Amino acid sequence: MAASEHHTTGSTAVGIAVVILTLIGWTVTPLFIEHFTQGANRIDPWTSNGWRYGFAALLWAPLLVGLRLNGKWPKGVMKAALIPATINGTAQVFFTMSFYRIDPAMVAFGLRAQMVFTAAGAALLFPPERKIIRSAGFLAGIGAVVVGTGGTVYFQDAGLGEKADGLGVFYAILAGAGFAGYALSVRKCMTGYSSMVSFAAISQYTALIQLVLMLCFAERFGAGALDLSAPQFGLLLMSAVIGIAAGHVLYYMSIERLGVAVSTGIIQLQPFTVAALSIPLFGEHLGGLQWVFGSLAVGGAMSMLWVQHAMKKKAKSAVSEYEALPPDHVAAAAVCEEAGEPPRRG
């Protein structure tokens, strides 16, 4: 095997391992949040967010401090991170509050609506994306997400979980819309900054938002977390490490090795893994019809990702062929491209 082939194989293997770890991390995080919504370990959502995001920001802060001390500070990064962080901080509030009203599996399936909001936002902000969004396969995927999410919500009374609340579903969908806006704003505002530096900067603002909200609205200004036993308090901080600090690093690593389509596609399995673990841990599970419609929503999301990946790959291939054309063929190729046809030789 050639050295380059060995490197590619090794990189793919690492990517698969990392994306599986990401899926595991983002599966257990909703379960951690759910754990702290009930029983003797219950803390209010403002306290939960304040402590978890505050601790995660502390873990990311050394990266920014190191850049500043080494004279490698990326100019304008904190200003650029302000809008994405504000959107992210708002979305995180609705995300966490939804767990206090509906089961974790319902939250996870409700968040699939994010794909629809992302597509709509991309069509408005990024004109090159419109061709993809107008394609039949992509529109079919959007339809499946809408119908699947709607069916999962409509048949929530068929589930046997203790929590089924319309406002909780609304919170989950709002969180999905917020996360879509966050992703789009990162793409719009953070161009030119590495993913690690971008997230480190965004996490500082997000933590600040959550801490201010905790001091304003939490019971006893968030001090209730200190009443938890040492093991339980450790679990609260561990949820920050797994779901926020480490989860994003692992996700970025998987994207670098496997690409966005594959990595994000695997992460779409999260609602199923959350639902499966919610049964033995909390006795909360979906009804049969919810599984059917939830599967439709996830399948639609994966279809959207696949169509996007296939069309972008085809476009890159066409561009490569276009660039290889002799000078006297460029004008003809440009006409074909404008007509929506791939460039042709001869």
Image: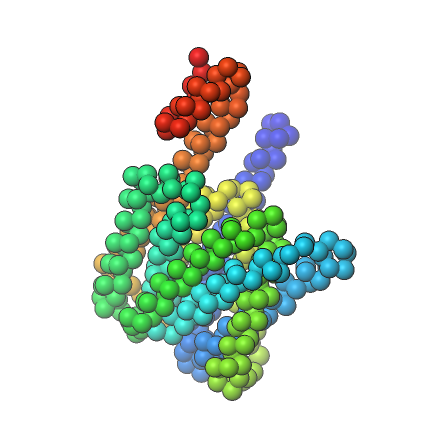
Relative image position of residue 232 (x, y in whole percent): 53, 76
Instruction: Give residue 134's quadrant in the image.
Output: top left
Q: Which residue sits at x=36%, y=49%?
A: 301
In the shown orientation, is residue 107 left or right of residue 70? left
Note whether 294 is above or below 6 in the view shown.
Answer: below
Q: Which residue sits at x=37%, y=51%?
A: 120
Q: Residue furthest bottom?
A: 220
Q: Which residue sits at x=36%, y=68%?
A: 171
Looking at the image, can residue 111 be seen?
yes
Viewer-side residue, 82 vs 44? 82
Relative image position of residue 114 (x, y in whole percent): 38, 56
Relative image position of residue 265 (x, y in whole percent): 42, 47
In the shown orientation, is residue 97 left or right of residue 56? left
Query: The N terminus lies in which quarter of the figure?
Result: top right
Looking at the image, can residue 112 be seen?
no
Viewer-side residue, 64 vs 83? 83
Instruction: Give residue 107's quadrant in the image.
Output: bottom left
Q: Which residue sits at x=35%, y=63%?
A: 173
Q: Residue furthest right?
A: 70
In the shown orientation, is residue 67 left or right of residue 16? right
